[in-house]
Amino acid sequence: MNNPTLDLLLKRRSASANALSEPGPSESELALLLTAASRVPDHKKLVPWRFILFQGEGRAAFGKVLAATCQAEEKDPGAFRLETEANRFLRAPLVIAVISRVIKNPAAPEWEQTLSAGAACQNLLVAATALGYGAQWITEWYGYSQGVRTALKLADNERVAGFVYIGTAKEAPDERERPALEDIVTAWTP
């Protein structure tokens, strides 16, 4: 069967953020990525996610925030670690923070809203791959940091679902072993 959508899904592979470089998506490609990311299941149309973009000089500026937060939250992180944090968002030309936000609604449980934000992350990855870019969805320590939450101005009902790094892959990512279907699929029987 020749199906471009299935072919894309079956070959999609995350590219390490460390293996990404310029160029990143153009403004029109970015609009496509964000439109694709927002076309996910969304019970009750609550839009339980939003996006924060880090591009250009904003990446280095946020790196200073990461380094300062690391120094404040960790005991003696060391100069190398602080330099790593300062340069973290420079690994890719575009970093998109996907923010999960839960809106109280008895007809749309919190879990469904959280899954919708995860689906937005996945759509970003697939759309980036479809456009020929490499991408990686990661959280790392700063996805859970109170200082970073404050810097991102997250509301009490929000949390980081992930940071999606997007750029041109310096090399094709290696394939990794995938689970065998017989190990992960069962049929329910009464």
Image (tube, helix red, strand yellow):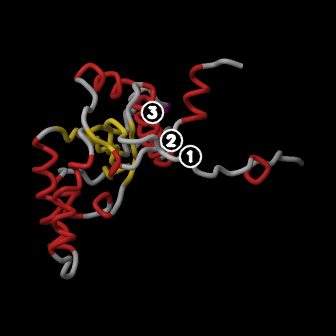
- Looking at the rendered structure, the kind of residue marked 2 is Arg
Looking at the image, which residue is at 55% across and 28% down?
Answer: 8
Quarter of the view holding residue 37: top left
For marks 1 and 3 on the same chain, the one whose residue lies earlier in the sequence? 3
Which residues make up the magenta segment? 41-45
Q: Mark 2: which secondary structure?
A: loop
Taking the view exactly as shown, the residue that stands out farthest to the front is: 171
Residue 110: which numbered mark, if any?
none
Residue labelled with disc 3? 123
| Residue sitting nearer the eye, 28 or 93 | 93
Residue labelled with disc 1? 175
**In this view of the protein, can residue 168 be seen by the observer?**
yes
Would residue 106 be counted in the magenta stretch?
A: no
Q: Mark 1: which secondary structure?
A: loop
Looking at the image, which residue is at 29% across and 23% down?
Answer: 31
Q: Is residue 24 left or right of residue 44?
A: left
| Residue sitting nearer the eye, 177 or 51 | 177
Quarter of the view holding residue 144: bottom left
Do the residues bearing badges 1 and 2 touch, measured as CB atoms within 8 Å? Answer: yes
Would residue 43 be counted in the magenta stretch?
A: yes
Q: Nearer the viewer, mark 1 or mark 3?
A: 1
Residue labelled with disc 2? 13
**Residue 91 at what x, y percent from top left?**
26, 49
Looking at the image, which residue is at 16% across and 59% down?
Answer: 86
Quarter of the view holding residue 28: top left
For marks 3 and 2 on the same chain, the one whose residue lies earlier in the sequence? 2
Looking at the image, which residue is at 25% across and 32% down?
Answer: 23
